[in-house]
Image (cartoon, rainbow, N blue to C red):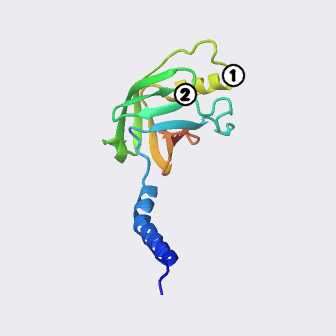
Amino acid sequence: MTTPRRRALAALSAALLATAPVLSACGDRETAVAGSTWQITGLWTTPEDPGMLPDAAAGRAQLIFGEATVTGSTGCAPIQGTVSFTRGGDPSRAREADAVTFEAVEIEVPDDSCQGTVRSVHEDLTDLLAPETAYDLRHESEVELVLTRQGELVDRPVIRLSAV
């Protein structure tokens, strides 16, 4: 004998089972590189540096990529520039890329209110985003992006980003 409660539970179970594939498909998708806001969560520049942003600077620096552009902030000053994406050395769209080159980047000079660890992050980003600097690009997870400077160095600089 079926009670109203059992019918309601059966309907709820059926609804959950029907949406499970949709929900899991959403969870398996990496955040798009282009068009998303990427908060800079770590800068690793030397082996002695732990790479995590200081509390005062956390959440202030970000990058937003287009298919051929980048904008954002160092936490002290705006960033604007052009980028190119490649896969296996050949030009590609951002969603297929395994590398990005910061072709030309303009970072404004911050005013005197930008000091301390926030200023250090600004200076690090100014160095890391120098024109013609290429980075390997990989998704660490669905919402994390890691840019590792290309080159021969053993300890290559890294920019860690999280989608917001």
Q: Which residue corresponds to the image point at 42% horizontal and 64% vertical from the top-left?
A: 19
Structural crowding at the residue carrying mark 2, measured as other residues with C-alpha within 10 Å and reported as few (<14), some (14–19) or many (≥20): many
For disc 1, the marked residue is 116
Check disc 1 and give the amino acid type.
Gly
Residue situated in front as seen by the camera: 147 or 72: 72
Residue situated in front as seen by the camera: 25 or 45: 25
Q: Position of residue 114 (x, y in %)?
A: 63, 18
Q: Considering the numbered disc 2 on the image, is that residue within a helix, a strand or a loop?
A: helix
Image disc number at residue 125: 2
Residue 81 to residue 45: above or below: above
Dividing the picture into quadrants, the one containing residue 64 is: top left
Q: Is residue 162 visible?
A: yes
Check disc 2 and give the amino acid type.
Leu
First reached walking from the N terminus: tag 2 or tag 1: 1
Say left or right for 47 vs 83: right
Q: Considering the numbered disc 1 on the image, is that residue within a helix, a strand or a loop?
A: helix
Alpha-carbon span between mark 2 and mark 1: 15 Å
